[in-house]
Image: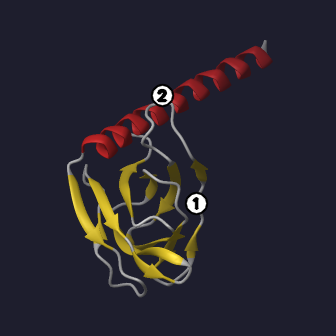
Amino acid sequence: MQSLQKLCLALSFSALLTACINHEDKEGCLLLQRGPASIVTAVAAGDDGPFVAYNGRRYDIRFVAISGGNGGRVRFRSEERGDFVLYLNKDIPLQILSTSGATVDIKATTTSSTECTEIHARHVAPFEVGSYTLSFGPTTDTSVGFVIEEAGL
């Protein structure tokens, strides 16, 4: 009987997790599809790039020339500790750096969603309160649509 209870609990957790992911993906899809949008131009190096935010909008990030192709850096300020989902409309290399320059480990990455065709990269990463640099590329693409959402809402 105990194993049946564990199985039921595991299935319930799995269904809840799927529902949360689907909700997040729906929000990411809507923002990638319809915006509202802000255009920002990344910087090639350093930590003085433009800010992107968790604010219910898509950022159309224009890339600059970097070693190996196009890419660049933008900044994100996390106002709270927790996991965030980063959506991209293209599958482009992404690295997250803390203010100390340490790489933030991305917990999970997928390259599609059942909710829409606009999601080509979906990264879940942990953030502490503070500023981060999001480094894109190198790629042959000249821009990317980007949305950030708090995980689990």
Residue appearing at x 36%, y 60% in the figure: 80
Residue 19: x and y, percent? 48, 28
Q: Nearer the viewer, residue 15 or 45?
A: 45
Mark 2 or mark 1: name the one nearer the start of the chain. Answer: 2
Examine the image and state in which quarter residue 60 appears. bottom left
The secondary structure type at the circle numbered 1 is: loop
The secondary structure type at the circle numbered 2 is: helix
Q: Is residue 103 left or right of residue 7?
A: left
Q: Is residue 4 above or below residue 96?
A: above
Q: Is residue 91 left or right of residue 50?
A: right
The number of numbered badges drawn on the structure is 2
Residue 153: x and y, percent? 38, 40
Give the CA separation, mark 2 to mark 1.
Answer: 21 Å
Amino acid at the residue labelled 2 = Ala
Residue at the disc numbered 1: 106
Examine the image and state in which quarter residue 73 appears. bottom left
Q: Is residue 48 above or below residue 152?
A: below
Residue 39: x and y, percent? 24, 64
Residue appearing at x 56%, y 46% in the figure: 111
Amino acid at the residue labelled 1 = Ile
